[in-house]
Amino acid sequence: MLARNLVRKRDFYAGGLMILFGLIMALKGPGYGFGTLTHMGPGFLPTILGVILAGLGIAIAAPALRSPEGEDEDILPEHREWWAWACILASPFAFMLFGTYFGMIPGTFACVFVAAMGAREATLKSTLILSTAITVFGVGLFSYALQIPMPVFVWRGL
Amino acid sequence: MIGTAFADLWYGFGVALEPQNIVWCLVGVLVGNMVGVLPGMGPLATISIILPLTYGIKPVGAILMLAGVMYGAQYGGAICSILLNLPCHPPHAVTCLDGFPMTKSGRGGAALGATVFASFIGASWGIIEMIFLAPVLVKAALQFGPTEICSLMLLGLLAGATLARGSPLKGVAMTLLGLMLGIVGTDIETGSERFTFGMTHLDDGIELIALALGLFGIGEFMNSVNQVSAVNAGYAKVTLKDMRPSKEEMRRTIAPMFRGTLIGSLCSLIPGTGPTIASFVAYATEKKISKTPEKFGTGMIEGVVCPEAATHASVQGDFIPTMSLGIPGDAVMALLLGALMIQGIVPGPQLINEHPDIFWGLVASFWIGNVMLVILNVPLIGIWVKLLAIPYKYLYPSAIFFVCIGVYAANNDIFQVGETAVIGLLGYVLLRLGFHPAPILLGFVLGPRFEENFRRAMTVSRGDLSVFVERPISAVFIALSVLLIALQIYVRMRPKKNGTIQGADQSISYHLRDDAYPIN
């Protein structure tokens, strides 16, 4: 019963995440050399900050454990846009991949195309038009006007 | 003192009126004004996108432009609130309450006209404050040793974390996360690599632009995708003639305008209380002292003018600690400081003496920019409103491309594009868990300087922590920090009562749902 309630509690996860981050710092910190207060090592501050952050995490999560209900605290939003989220996150990687291997034009096109496919009412035609327009504008602005040193078009092979 | 202030200001106008600087200032306010109108694009995202483009510009031009974006967005936000009932940015949420009813009854133009006037007065007061207060602060701050700087930073970080919106505990956690992200990379003092997890790309630390664009760009797009609906711009037809308030409206504007300015400038003196709180307090005050409080919400010009004046006074006031002490009050200021640091300028009390062109040029450009905005606002409103018709499904893919190319251009390093996406995912997760990511930026920018000064203070005092309370100036800062925490605990423990601010808070909770406009 308790476990099922916890799943719905936002602060439980919020606190948990902070505890995780805090522990990473506090456990990894001393490995860099803790030192003393007078001669602080590189690991001194991370360790201290990690301990404080973990403590804050407990303080954030504790009230969630105590209160009985958490029905409206679902951590996922009402509309779950898995496809759109995936597209947005994939878009920079598409830019990286195509930009590195084929240059700025394919990189830009892929970046905008992947991102635009995330919109619910996107059609193939509208996405292609948008990607082409942004590519022409973007390459003109960044490559020719602002002289960003990224090859416009190359073939690096695979 | 007034004489030197005028001489400095005169010099500042000389810098700001150089042709290329005027152009940068104009570009900045135009872009800011435009973006202030667009929903789902905050000043933070805009400044981060423009930041890489400023590398080729001289530091003065770059900072004038970035600051212009910021206060340009303030004017744009008011247009959106009054004409469209869209609180694009939280400081303008209260403006909707009486601004939109005025629009519905056909007085939207007058509301805008009065707002522009009040904003200008508020901003001017903030600028005057900056001219006189900053040199005084600098004089005091030049006496500070590492101990004082450390405790002042502690106060600034705590204030920024706890007084922002949302739970103070979560705010402090975000600040700590920011400090942690600032630690990633090579330690300056010993040269050892920390938290790079074997990735050589992280040796130089996380890039400020990657962090800002991840949190406020990618994270925000994930939050708004398929959520932003088309805007009803039915009321948004305003001509120049409409913008002149009637004599009666003008008379009712004057007193609230000055009250708002006062509230805004007082709020800006308390570190961490940004324009949002200033506008809330201003609206609540105006409602409280009004003879007809029940009419608020039906189109009272007082309820539009007072918060707007407060917002502008407070925004200008926020520049004072940022420029004179090097301690930013909120995430936007942290980003501007970061921009200066990228240009190789060390923020802190020595900035005004070492780079007078930047400081006084900035002060003068505030005035020039504000005048530009007052003039430009009138003909441009129609164009901005048309921009709102651009569907979000076209807007965000284009913005993601700007994010990618901007991050790449910062160091010509494609790895950082991926870094941005990962940070974006983290930002969105934090948002869903009820964190406001803005304090991360504060911690990130101040982190390395905090560590450096803390180390120095401890070396000087031979590891004696009591030095922080033994030195009087430092003790004051520590006492204020403790007071701040005590106040937070007191406010949370107190049984919930409908005080003035909570009252206003409830009445605008409709506009300020956490999920709707989470970031700025």
Image: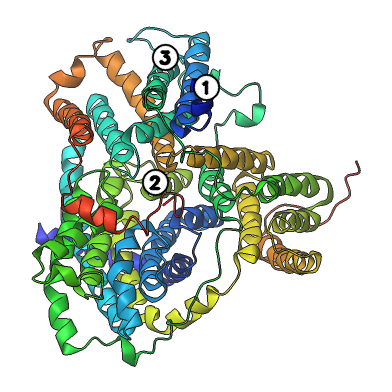
Quarter placement of the C terminus of chain A? top right
- How far is the residue under mark 2 from the one under mark 3? 26 Å
Residue B482 lies, with reference to residue A119, above or below; the image says: above
Residue B108, picture quadrant: bottom left
Residue B418 visible in the displayed image:
yes
What residue is shown with label 3? A44
For mark 1, give the secondary structure: helix
What residue is shown with label 1? A3
Q: Residue furthest bottom?
A: B241
Q: Nearer the viewer, residue B251 or B462?
A: B251
- Rendering coords of residue B67 (x, y %): 39, 59
Q: Are marks 1 and 2 in contact (CB under 8 Å)?
A: no
Q: Residue at x 9, y 64 (%)?
A: B289
Mark toward the viewer: 2 or 3: 2
- Rendering coords of residue A49 (x, y %): 40, 21
Q: Nearer the viewer, residue A89 or A2?
A: A2
- How far is the residue under mark 3 from the one under mark 1? 37 Å
- Rendering coords of residue A93 (x, y %): 72, 44
Binning the other alpha carbons within 10 Å of mark 1 as few (below 14), some (14 to 19) or many (20 upward) gives few
Q: Which mark is residue B331?
A: 2
Mark closer to the chain start, 3 or 1:
1
The amino acid type of the residue labelled 2 equals Ala
Q: Chain of mark 1?
A: A
The amino acid type of the residue labelled 1 equals Ala
Q: Chain of mark 3?
A: A
Binning the other alpha carbons within 10 Å of mark 2 as few (below 14), some (14 to 19) or many (20 upward) gives many
Please state if A12 lies on the left or on the right of B512 as rendered: right
The amino acid type of the residue labelled 3 equals Phe
